[in-house]
Amino acid sequence: MLALLKKLWKNESGLSATEYAVLAAVMVGALVGAFALLKPKINNAFTNAGNQIENATQSGSN
């Protein structure tokens, strides 16, 4: 396994379509994981912003 990694590290030829596909899959996985972790915080931020806007418009109409 280590020999394969060394060979890949030293390989200076351009990336193939397969390597780009693997890279894209890893990036998508990382993004999905990040969004899954951040979803509750993002949801709370938008809920709080909406509540503040609603409170501001209600208090301004009195």
Image (spheres, rainbow, N blue to C red):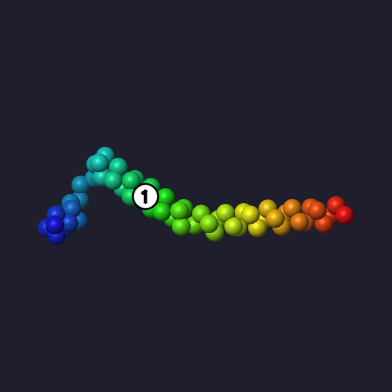
Q: Which residue is at 68% across, 53% downward?
A: 50
> Which x, y percent locates residue 57?
79, 52
As drawn, 18 above or below 60? above
Left or right of 10? Residue 35 is right
- Residue count near mark 1 (Cα–Cα under 10 Å), binned few <14, some 14–19, many ≥20: few
Task: Answer whether residue 36 is visible to the viewer in this image.
Answer: yes
| Residue situated furthest top in the rendering | 17
Left or right of 9? Residue 39 is right
Q: Which residue is at 55% across, 55% downward?
A: 42
Q: In the rendered image, which quarter contains the N terminus?
A: bottom left
Residue for badge 1: 29
As drawn, 16 above or below 8? above
Task: Answer whether residue 10 is visible to the viewer in this image.
Answer: no
Q: In the rendered image, which quarter contains the C terminus?
A: bottom right
Q: Which residue is at 65% across, 58% downward?
A: 48
| Residue situated furthest left in the rendering | 3
> Which x, y percent locates residue 24?
34, 45
Element under disc 1: helix
Left or right of 36? Residue 8 is left
Q: Could you tell me the amino acid type at mark 1?
A: Gly
Q: Which residue is at 53% across, 57% downward?
A: 40
Left or right of 56? Residue 7 is left
28, 6: nearer the viewer: 28
> Which x, y percent locates residue 18?
25, 41
> Which x, y percent locates residue 14?
24, 45
Task: Tell me how many marks there are.
Answer: 1
26, 49: nearer the viewer: 49
